[in-house]
Amino acid sequence: MGTKTCNTCNEIKKANVDNFTINNLLASILRNFVLQYKQFITDQSKINIILIGGIPKKILILKTLFEFYYPKNKIKINSGNIENTHLGMIKYLENKFKK
């Protein structure tokens, strides 16, 4: 996949106390959201990362951030129409009420 460039990613890295803005704060939150998974993603057996749920669908920059911070991985956003939470609830209820 190679090294990706990301202007937003580079701006996040430059944020500090001297140039603090609301945009820097929000960018830092997104950066930390992505980096919190590092311990799970660095395993060489995990090549594909599928972002699921409403957050990646609504905050499209997350895919770009994952590609920037995990360049060896293939990043996809799950395109299913039914939210995974709902699928999990259906599965739970089906198992709970099996006769």
Image (tube, helix red, strand yellow):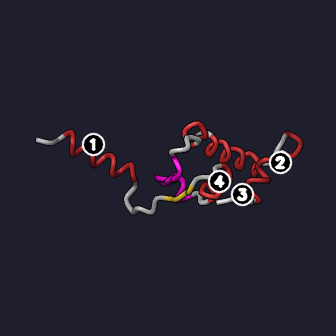
Label 4 packing within 10 angstroms: few (<14), some (14-19), many (20+): some
Image-based side of 26 in relation to 94, left or right = right
Name the amino acid, label 3: Thr
Q: Residue 48: where, in percent of width, then height?
A: 51, 53
Label number found at residue 3 = 3
Does 56 appear in magenta?
yes
Label number found at residue 92 = 1
- What residue did someone put label 4 on? 71
Q: Earlier in the sequence, mark 3 or mark 1?
A: 3
The span shown in magenta is 46-58
Q: Earlier in the sequence, mark 1 or mark 4?
A: 4
Residue drawn at the location 45% of the way across and 63% of the way down: 79
Label number found at residue 14 = 2
Q: Are marks 4 and 3 in contact (CB under 8 Å)?
A: yes
Residue drawn at the location 54% of the way across and 39% of the way down: 40
Q: Are marks 1 and 2 in contact (CB under 8 Å)?
A: no
Name the amino acid, label 1: Tyr
Name the amino acid, label 2: Lys
Q: Earlier in the sequence, mark 1 or mark 2?
A: 2
Name the amino acid, label 4: Pro
Q: Earlier in the sequence, mark 4 or mark 3?
A: 3
Q: Nearer the viewer, mark 2 or mark 3?
A: 3
* Nearer to me, 74 or 60: 74
